[in-house]
Amino acid sequence: MKQQPFDIHVKFACQHCGLEIGVVFTTEPVTSVSCSSCHQTFTVMRPAIAEEILFDWENEALFQKIRADKSQSSNASLMTLIINVIELLTWRDNGDGQVEAIKAMRQWLIENEGPPTLAELIQACDNRRMHKRN
């Protein structure tokens, strides 16, 4: 993408006396200018140019694509978990299907960045159980 131009010329009429006022922006986003006729002071913002607006839209589009890809990946992962849990609770049950289903759900929450406090709580519960068994 091209570098943004350094000099942007803006002209406007004074609201009080109608004199034309000119401002040249170099790198600053905001400037103050006084009317030479009535001495009224104006604060003027650098206008957004087409390339800057296009750049913002490109960034937004990229962000939305990444978000959609992540959502699609999470949905696929969640479907896999659901199928795994159903299998563990039904025909693949070797007597410990409920325990294995709970373990699979816990592991999925930890791997898929479920709420951090939930993941920490699950790990803390697992650690307490391990200490009780030992």
Image (tube, rainbow, N blue to C red):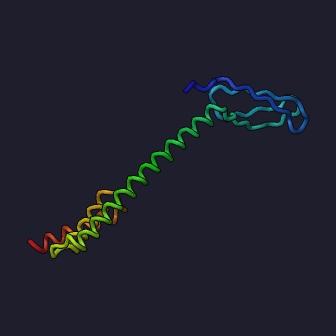
**32, 106: nearer the viewer:** 106
- Left or right: 65 with respect to 23? left
The residue drawn where x is 51% and y is 47% is 64
Q: Is residue 24 left or right of residue 5?
A: right
Report x, y in % for residue 55: 57, 35
Residue at image position (91%, 35%) is 17
**Which residue does the image show at 25% across and 73% down from the upper left?**
89
- Quarter of the image for residue 121 reads bottom left
Residue 66, given in percent of the width and then of the height, sits at 45, 46
* For residue 65, side relative to residue 53 (left or right): left
Q: Quadrant of residue 109?
A: bottom left
| Residue 46 picture quarter | top right
Residue at the limit of the structure toward the left, as seen here: 134
Residue lying at the far right of the rendered structure: 17
Instruction: Compare residues 128 and 15 and report the one nearer the observer.
Output: 128
Give percent across and percent down for residue 21.
82, 29
Can you give x and y, in whole percent of width and height, for residue 19 in the image?
88, 30
Task: Tell me the quadrant of the picture where the C terminus can be found.
Answer: bottom left
Establish if 81 lies above or below 28.
Answer: below
The quadrant in which the N terminus is found is: top right
Tell me the residue at 88%/33% (across/down): 38
Front residue of this view, candidates 15 and 65: 65
Q: Is residue 91 placed above or below 54 in the rendered structure? A: below
Q: How many numbered dots are placed on residues in this image? A: 0
